[in-house]
Amino acid sequence: MGAAMPWPVVFRVVPDQTALLTQLLSHTVDVMEVVPPRDVDRVKRDPRIEVVAYPDRQYVYVGWNLKHPFLKSRDVRRALSHAINVQEIVDTVWYGYAKPAVGPVHSSLWAFNRSLKPFPYDPEKAGTLLREQGFTDTNGDGTLEKDGKPFEIEILTNKGNAIREATLILVQNQLAKVGVKVVARPLEWNVFVQKLMGREFDACVQGMRVPTKLDLKDTWHTTAIENGLNVISYSNPKVDALIDRARAVEDYHEAKAFLEEAQALIVDDQPFTFLYENQRLNGLNRRIRNAKMNVLSTFFNLEDWTAAE
Amino acid sequence: MTRYVIRRLGVSVLLLFLILTATFFIIHLAPGDPSRLYLDPSVPPQAQARLKAALGLDKPLAVQYGQWVTQMLQGNLGVSFYYHRGVRSLLAETVPKTLLLSSAALALEFGIAILAGMFMATRRSRAARGTYHGVSLFLCSLPPFWLGLILILVFSYGLGILPPAHMSDIGMEGNPWNVLRHLILPALTLAIPGAAATSRFMFKSFEEVLRQPYMLTHTLYNLPRREILFTFGLKNALLPMITLFGLSLPFLVSGALITEVIFSWPGMGRLAYNAILTRDYPLIIGASLLSSFMVLAGNLLADLLYGLVDPRIRHAR
Amino acid sequence: MRADWTWIPRLAVLLPPLLRPGKAAGILSLCGGEALILAAGCAAFLLFPYRRIPGWFPTKGGRFGAAVFGLLLFGAVFAPLISPHDPDEQFQPSVCRYLPPFSKAYASADGRAVTLTPSPGNHAVRFPLGTDAFGRCIASRILAGGRISLSIGLLSVLLTLVLGLTVGCVSGYLGGWWDAAIMRVVDTLLAFPRLFLLLLLAGILEKSLSIFGIVLILGGLSWMEVARLVRGQVLSLKERDFITAAKAIGASTFRILTRHVFPHLRGLLLIDATLRIGGIILTEAALSFLGFGVQPPHASWGNIIADGREALLDGWWVSAFPGLAILATVFSLYLMGEGAMKEV
């Protein structure tokens, strides 16, 4: 890293968030990555600590496995997306430090389609759509059925991320209101990845990290079902064609046009229910000077940091 | 005495093998492919087949059993999937910390119990004894993990005088006073319910002793009250306490798990818990076996202690 | 002649159906296994011939404990009737999260929009013990959790008693070589370190345990001590005259055990069971707290405490009250057991 650090830097792993927060507030630690949104106000009340906020490099979504007999229908997916109240999730879990995500491309990227709007929260429409698709509650237990099979899906997420697990619980509750029973299963990361790669899931709450090079092929192209990260088995020939053409042209404006159209098509199909783009919230003791935290890393310019006593 | 010792040792060795066998069978009877328990999931699938053969996972069960038991007895506990380090060294780092916490808790528990039991047994007023019975039973019913959270709430978040987690502050790892500060709350959490239960035994035992004729004799001889109580009363009342102490030795290892998790105390319990969450099978199996053995050792020690103390055993051939 | 105060709680059981007949009809459709078991427990509590067991509730402490436990059991069985809200209902989480005890909110008719200040057309919603991270009523969750925790406790102790009684009777009555062999096995099982067996199982099993799985494990770990206790008693009872007489008239072993031996064991078993449920409830709570027992969204006292742990600063009530519930249950059980022991 070049010049020697002016003082020893200690990285400490604290599994208990509240304990870590207490240490930040009692000035035992100087930097806390990932301050829980609910505690931001409490941290701000301390004049000696500042909360550094910047947009995080991801958006979170619910990915529907298109191989599932119920989820392969576009109208069913649109119904589920109508049933999910994204603003409520943002307010409850992020206390306002996030905004609704609208499409497969993060809003900070050059190819983002600015004309896309958040998918409307409309539980009545969700109910109508599901009824049209043949789902009714025949036995009065609160869960819809079709052809004798109850609409019950298992949604996976990774354990250990309190915000994602909370999001899952909110989604579960919102879907229950329209008659879809959700079994929430937080899984340990390794197991979670295994299940995703093995396509053994109904749905998942996941984060999509923003790449440094934008390429929709890996996730949205039909060829990526076998050989890529298209774990939900999404296949739309029009989207495939647009992606291929965007990759083929040199001109940034032309590519952007193709990609914008591809985004609009994907949003129409709702293979994901796009949830939110959150901010990254770090706690920093003001005695540390010159720290420039950004989207690439919290410790981006660690070698330039200095500490006042 | 010697026969007793030899017999107890023999039983312990037998139990050791039984535990190993039981663990082996649980691993292999569990649903799913048992080889996932040995194969690091980050190994690509093509290499997995080769690794399976190399580890001998395609051999018949009996052969695997033999191999596995030999490995375990030699102390080769494998490599952790998550930490990518030897399980043995991971355990070796954390066991002393667990022992520190448990010993402190045990010392606190017996210290409080003996003094409280003795003190209350000498009270004359029925109201005092009644209150003692109620309060001690109440403290026995405290869920230990809840007690820990309440202590953290009151002393760390509320009053801010004691740290809520870890063994020491950053930069003060070797500082014994700092460690002591961090030790207080978790040790209390472990000690309080146990002390309540143990003090009730002490109370009963001391009451029995107080009723004995020799206590009256000493009073008639005009010995100072304190000396009577401590020298004669205590010594005799301690006999069942020693048995209890022996019974508590195995808990040095197993009792601290939840407390370690709550206070992020870097001991073996917390390590095992995280291993379960991350499906780190070599570490789970290693921790489980090690703690079983330590419990066995604790039981053995307790029996030997009891043998020393009980004259019938001590003087047998 | 002492007045029989036990009729008070027995009659109180009839109150909720009278007060909320609509919900009472709904309870008939709640055929969850736990509801049945608890109903059975409640029936036992109501119909049991307490006065015929010598020494039951001889002490003030024992009576107090029985009253508290009765109240808790009653609360658990009638949870759907007396619960202020549905335990899974999330009242607009962004508004109602972490509301302190005794707070009120105002919900619109369709439940969609909730405010903290009164507004026209909104009816008041009360949260006696506050809300959790998702705007769920803690009091309702504690009642629902009580159902699960208490039914697991009762079922486990039933399993423990059945297993322990059978093994102990067989071993004690048969005596000789059988007795030695069986007791060896029991002692070995007793020597097994229980927590780490649990951990190993929890770690290796892919899926989390169902309620019956939890009952099996908890019951399976405690029956050995009961077996020893029973065996000891049977050994001493075996030599008594009435057993010799029964054998003399040719009664079968089974008949002797059930009609002559068992009645003498009843009192002891009841006391042991009472003291043991306390420990089992604590163990189940600990398991759920760690995440290996009852899984969310089902509430169990242990997992509500775990939920509250991450927000101890913002909502201490989420963790505090379920703990008090556990404390009250275990304390009352211990008081009952201690009280009964005084006579024996």
Image: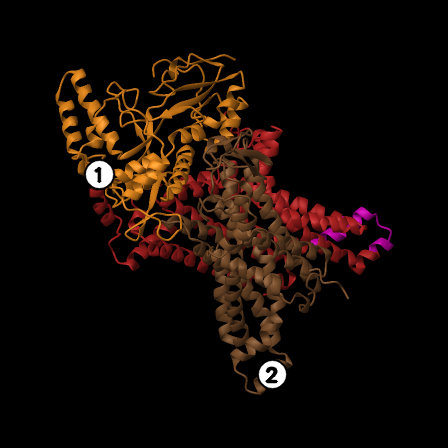
How many labels were placed on the picture? 2
Instruction: Label 2, secondary structure: give it.
Output: helix
Looking at the picture, tell me which residue is in the foreground, B301 or B168: B168
Residue C10 visible in the shown view: yes
Are the residues at dot 1 and dot 2 in contact (C-beta closer than 8 Å)? no
Looking at the picture, tell me which residue is in the foreground, B120 or C5: C5
User: For the residue carrying disc 1, how many other residues have a C-alpha within 10 Å: few (<14), some (14-19), or many (20+)?
Assistant: many
Q: Which residue sits furthest front?
A: C121
Looking at the picture, tell me which residue is in the foreground, A283 or B290: A283
Q: Residue A6: which disc?
A: none
* Residue that badge 1 annotates: A233
* Residue that badge 2 annotates: C244
Q: Is residue C145 depicted above or below C116 in this figure?
A: below
- Left or right, C13 with respect to A228, comes to right
Chain letter for the red colouring in the rendering: B
Give x and y (percent) for residue B65.
Answer: 32, 56
Q: Chain of mark 1?
A: A
- Left or right, A218 with respect to C55, comes to left
Q: Is residue B13 depicted above or below A49 in this figure?
A: below
- Left or right, A203 with respect to B242, comes to left
* Image quarter (top left, top right, bottom left or bottom right) of the N terminus of chain A: top left
Chain A hue? orange
Q: Which segment is the magenta one?
A: B218-238
Chain letter for the brown colouring in the rendering: C
Residue A170 is a magenta residue:
no
Rendered image quadrant of residue B112: top right
Q: Amino acid at mark 2?
A: Thr
Residue B235 is a magenta residue:
yes
Looking at the picture, tell me which residue is in the foreground, B295 or A31: A31
Per the model, the C-alpha gap separating discs 1 and 2 is: 77 Å
